[in-house]
Every structure is written in C-alpha cells, then in structure tokens.
Image: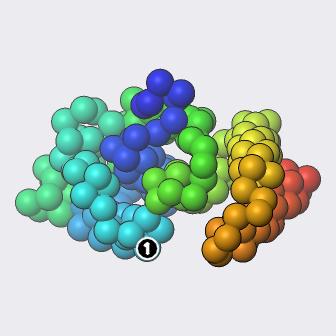
Amino acid sequence: MYRDNSLMPKEAVRLAVLGTLIQGGPTRYADLAGSLRHFLDRIAGPSLDLMGTSLEMLRYEGLIEALDGTGMEDNALLGPTAAGRAEFDTLIRANVRAPSSDGLNKLVIALKLRFLHLLDGESQKDQIDHLVSLCETELARLGDLKKASIGTDGHFADWLDHDIAQTQERLAWYQDLLARL
C-alpha cells in the first residue's frame, strides 16, 4: 500500500481475486483467471501494472489454496484461506486516492462497490462515507482551480465545468447510496 493507505495495482488485483472467491465460492483456476482478466480490462483498460499478479503468487503467499489438484496445470478448484479472508478485509477498507478519475482509482472504487455487501453494515457506511468525502475534496479542488482560471481562453473552462458536473453527480450518487444503507 502507498503511505496514505491506498491500494497499489498489485493490491487491487489481490482484492479482485479474494473478493471474487469470497463472494462466489471456490472457482476453477481457468474460470477465475478469465473472469478477472475480463473485469480488470473492462474497468481499467489493458495495464501492465495489473497483469503482474499471478494466482500462483497468491497461492505461494498462502492467500488462496487449491482445494483439489495443484494449480494452473490441472485447473484446480481455488478458494480463499483464512489469511486470504483477513487480507481481503484489510484491502477493502483501504483508502482511495484523490483524484478519483485515474484508471487505478476507478478500479479500486469498482472493486469496493462490487464487494461492499461482504462487509457489515457499519463498515459499508464507513466506506461510502469515505467516497463522499473524497468527492467533496475533489469538488473543493476543482472549485479553487476554476476560480484561478477565470478569464482564460480556450476550452479549459468548459472542460472544468464538465468535470465539476461529473463529480457533483458522483457525489449525489454516493450520498444516495449512503442513505440507502
């Protein structure tokens, strides 16, 4: 994790693997690898940073285990270990870095929302409250930028208004979700 307790790409992949196994139960090696590749590519786009973590490494570290067979070579059924469940709990509670528009942050937020229901109610609220705070901080930053950019030529002001509107919409969505929890 970064110093601010936010996830690095390798840890985002760990969260995806562990959350998938905890949510869906034991899964065949090939099915797990294929579904993760599909999800990660569709959310964050192709990324060398995200391709580096192998299921074999997670097995070696004791976070997942083969329930039958040995691994990739015989398409073993994989499941999380107790250490993997503990790691999932740590990873899902990690911070999201500002701004929230880069590919890694989008992936981390998508993973949090995908597996949020696996946490207790109070922890779910804490995670969404953190995302609300992140949006509020982003809006303050963008507002300051807009004030400092008044009178500039070009399309920057229009783009900034668009970015502010998207962040306001995201904030409203998170606030609505928080109210529903």
Q: Amino acid at mark 1?
A: Arg
Residue 61 visible to the viewer:
yes
Residue 128 visible to the viewer:
no
Q: Position of residue 51 (x, y in %)?
A: 25, 57
Quadrant of the image for the N terminus? top left
In the image shown, does 22 or 1 lie closer to the viewer?
Answer: 1
Q: Is residue 81 left or right of residue 4?
A: left
In the image shown, does 18 or 152 lie closer to the viewer?
Answer: 152
Residue at 57% of width from left, 58% of height from top?
101
Q: Is residue 148 left or right of residue 9?
A: right
User: Which residue is the site of mark 1?
Assistant: 42
Count of numbered circles on the image = 1
The correct choice, above or below, for 17 with respect to 160 in the image is: above
Residue 162: quadrant of the picture: bottom right
Neighbor class of circle 1 (other Cα within 10 Å; few <14, some 14-19, many 20+) is few
In the image shown, does 85 or 111 lie closer to the viewer?
Answer: 111
Residue at 72% of width from left, 45% of height from top?
141
Residue at 32% of width from left, 68% of height from top?
46
